[in-house]
Amino acid sequence: MIAGLRAVGSNPTDQIESRKRDTRVCTGEVAVSLAATVVCFARERGAMAGASPSARAEVVVPPDWAAATATASSEPAPPVVVVCGPKNAGKSTFSRLLLNSLLPRYGRVGYLDTDVGQPEFSPPGCLSFHVVDEALTDLLNPTLRVCERCCFFGDISSKRDPETYLNCLFHLYDYFVEKYRSGASEPLPLIVNTPGWVKGAGFDMLVEMLRYICPTIVVQIRISAQSKNLPDGMFWLDCGQTGPNMINIDAPFHDALNRSLLIQKDSYGMRERRLIECFKQCFPSDISLTTNKELAYALTSLPPYEVSISDVMVIHLHCQVPPSEVWHSLNATIVGLAISCGTIEAGRSIPWCAGLGIIRGIDVQRGILYVITPVPLEHLQRVDLLLQGLIEIPKSLLQVRGCVSPYMPTNVLHRISERDINT
């Protein structure tokens, strides 16, 4: 466990206070309603991606989408809605629209984000559970949000380890049921946004997911290429079983006026932007970091945390590393900062992830890691696991010329020592 922090060469109070997380929602101009001809305006690309901040994309909500959200919102009890369909069908956009339609009635909505490649509110490689209490003002590009629970899977696809992926998902769902459904005075509705991998092993995983969650509503989005769609009906149930309310809607692209109904995702670019947004949270919200170059320079000058190697355990999620190379393999990588306490279930450890960090440098002789992270100090003190997956530092941050190397043990913000663990 990381504890007993003291400042080195800086005022700890000023440094800690200055590193507050920016959890504000982007204020793109959006008009949201359940009318069949809703027109929404949102920023198509953020400034960090190099596009003009004034760039707008006109989005029209089709009639069947509006009808589907109206049906879910009028359920007599808080619904559990699973949204499924192939890639680029609009699952995320529909889930955001549905979330906004449920908020006026319930005030708060649970959101289980299961797409590790293109998560809604978390960095890539994470499964997370959120409780949302305010409308999303940008239906196309939601910003990062502080999650209530997160599991770091460490890859952008569940193909490498379907069992661990499903265990993480089930663990998050169990948390939701225990806290917000079983015996809760005001049960919350839940939206489950699923990945677009719906063939082969991906289909089998979706079936397992649906059988475990037992949703009250399943929304299946279909595209024009029939071979890529899921089977008709309640494909995950055995014959004779009673199923949930099944809603089928189409994935729109352009209407009669040639207005864009959906924007094709740039998956790689989206993941990079999410990671960039994550590490921008290392800085106060009033600091302007509008380009990748500015962020890269800022990160190189940011004092890291100093962590004793003896205080943490390293877990390699998707590969095996020789014991002699464990610490060297961490240098210049993104890791999940996790908490192992109280997470043993059915003989399997499922740690909660407090957030991501960059291993800026390692001093093997002194047994010290240098970590950059936006995780607040009070959560960082509980971290005792470093989860190394396959999530890489964005290339745009590594290719900025003229930056002093960030992988140097200088300008340390806090030193974390083993003798302070029990204080």
Image: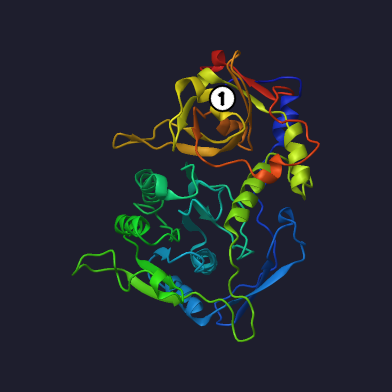
Q: Residue furthest right?
A: 402
Residue closer to the observer: 285 or 240: 240
Badge 1 crowding class, 10 Å Cα cut-off, few under 14, some 14 to 19, many 20 or more, is few
- Which image quadrant for residue 60? bottom right
Question: Residue, x 61% and y 72% (percent of image)?
Answer: 32
- Which image quadrant for residue 25? bottom right
Answer left or right for 386 relative to 368.
Answer: left
Q: Residue furthest left?
A: 240
Specify the amino acid type for callout 1. Answer: His
Question: Residue, x 51% and y 40% (percent of image)?
Answer: 390
Residue that badge 1 annotates: 328
Visible in this render: residue 339? yes
Give the answer, above or below, for where 384 lies relative to 229. above
Give the answer, above or below, for where 38 lies relative to 401. below
- Which image quadrant for residue 401? top right
Answer left or right for 216 relative to 306.
Answer: left
Q: What x and y, as percent, mark residue 314? A: 48, 27
Q: What x and y, as percent, mark residue 109? A: 49, 59
Residue closer to the observer: 395 or 218: 395
Q: What x and y, as percent, mark residue 192? A: 43, 59
Q: What x and y, as percent, mark residue 365? A: 60, 13
Q: Quadrant of the C terminus?
A: top right
